[in-house]
Amino acid sequence: MTYAIVDFLERSLKDGTVSSDDTESIEIAKSCIADSFHVKPDDPAARKDALDDGTLLKIYSAYELLKGKKSTATEAGKSNTSAPKPAGPTPTSPEAESFKSQGNAAMQQKDYPKAIELYTKAINLSPTNPIYLSNRAAAYSASHKHKEAVSDAEIAVSADPTYTKAWSRLGLARFVLGDATGSMEAYQKGIEYEGNGGSEAMKKGYKTAKEKVEQLEKEGASEDVEEDTSSPTRGAGGAAAGGGMPDLSGLASMLGGGRGGGGGGMPDISSMMNNPMFASMAQNLMSNPEALQGLMNNPRLREMASSFGGGGGGGGGGMPDIGALMSDPSLRE
């Protein structure tokens, strides 16, 4: 920056911005600046290195554009698609076009660092040219530097929103950074500026981003449902697969239930639960619902059920001893 200021003072003398009567004052200013920052304005190599073809006016032009740009990044990497009012692309030059062409050739060779270097030189000559910025964004994305790609693409669409390639590059970079919503919005802008429903590539990008947004929304809703259904306040009479008390109506029916205690059928379930051994069995079924199905399919239990459950309402043999049932090895599987 110091060299750029010194360079600006010298140019101001040469182009007549400052009167020749003020030459001495300018020289004193240059000397004071050089001494304060310990630089050597008369060293051509150091000067060329520091300036890298970027004059103070070009630096200021880029600064003005960035100053007017709204902050779009959030802590989650989200971006606000609404771009600032375009400052307008800076004019190009044959030299800048040459750097761009060399950058394109480096991209074809997949030499992305070289491409970035060459596009940067073109941008130094034309700081808000959307083509140069968009091309460098593509090179950054290819180098997995997606944050830098987002920055370049945002400046490009700010300078010229009609340059739709920049919207596409912005959409891609945001998507890779996990900002599916910002990506979808960028592609949507690209489709709008392309007109006629947008290109296939732009529509495909939009569709991919939209599907990701919908997937994330569904996953969020699913997590809410899981939290609700895993609540311990669920009723004990729910389905076995839900984690509550399994439905014992099938077991009661198989054991002759529903015929009343006086007729030898299955006693009231609440009475059975007073038996410690049956209560233990029920507790096991609650923690392992699949065991109920296995129990009901057990041939030994079915044989015993038919021996005491076939008598209808009166003399069917009565309810077997629960302790005997629980002691039978064939029922412990």
Image (cartoon, rainbow, N blue to C red):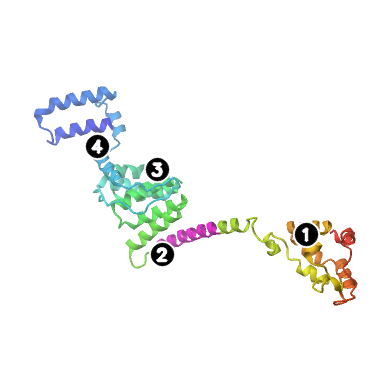
Q: Position of residue 310 (x, y in %)?
A: 87, 76
Is the residue marked by circle 2 packed among few (<14), some (14-19), or many (20+) residues within 10 Å? few
- Kindly indicate whether the residue at mark 2 contacts the one at mark 1 (C-beta within 8 angstroms): no
Task: Locate residue 41 relative to residue 254 in the image: left or right.
Answer: left
- If you read the primary sequence from the N terminus, does the residue marked by circle 4 or circle 2 appear first? 4
Give the overall secondary structure of the magenta segment.
helix
Which mark's residue is nearer the viewer, 1 or 2? 1
The residue segment tinted magenta is: 199-221
Q: Which element type, helix, strand or loop, lies under badge 3?
A: helix
Q: Position of residue 71 (x, y in %)?
A: 35, 46
Residue denoted by label 4:
56
User: Given the image, on which type of amino acid does mark 2 rest?
Assistant: Glu
Q: Which mark is residue 114?
A: 3
Q: Which mark is residue 282?
A: 1
The quadrant where residue 291 appears: bottom right
- Kindly indicate whether the residue at mark 3 contacts the one at mark 1 (C-beta within 8 angstroms): no
- If you read the primary sequence from the N terminus, does the residue marked by circle 4 or circle 1 appear first? 4
Between the residue at mark 4 and the residue at mark 2, the CA separation in whole angstroms equals: 42 Å
User: Given the image, on which type of amino acid does mark 3 rest?
Assistant: Lys
Q: Which element type, helix, strand or loop, lies under badge 1?
A: helix
Check the image and report above or below for 42 versus 57: above
User: Given the image, on which type of amino acid does mark 4 rest?
Assistant: Leu
Q: Which mark is residue 200?
A: 2
Q: Is residue 214 magenta?
A: yes
- Kindly indicate whether the residue at mark 1 contacts the one at mark 4 (C-beta within 8 angstroms): no
Between the residue at mark 1 and the residue at mark 3, the CA separation in whole angstroms equals: 73 Å
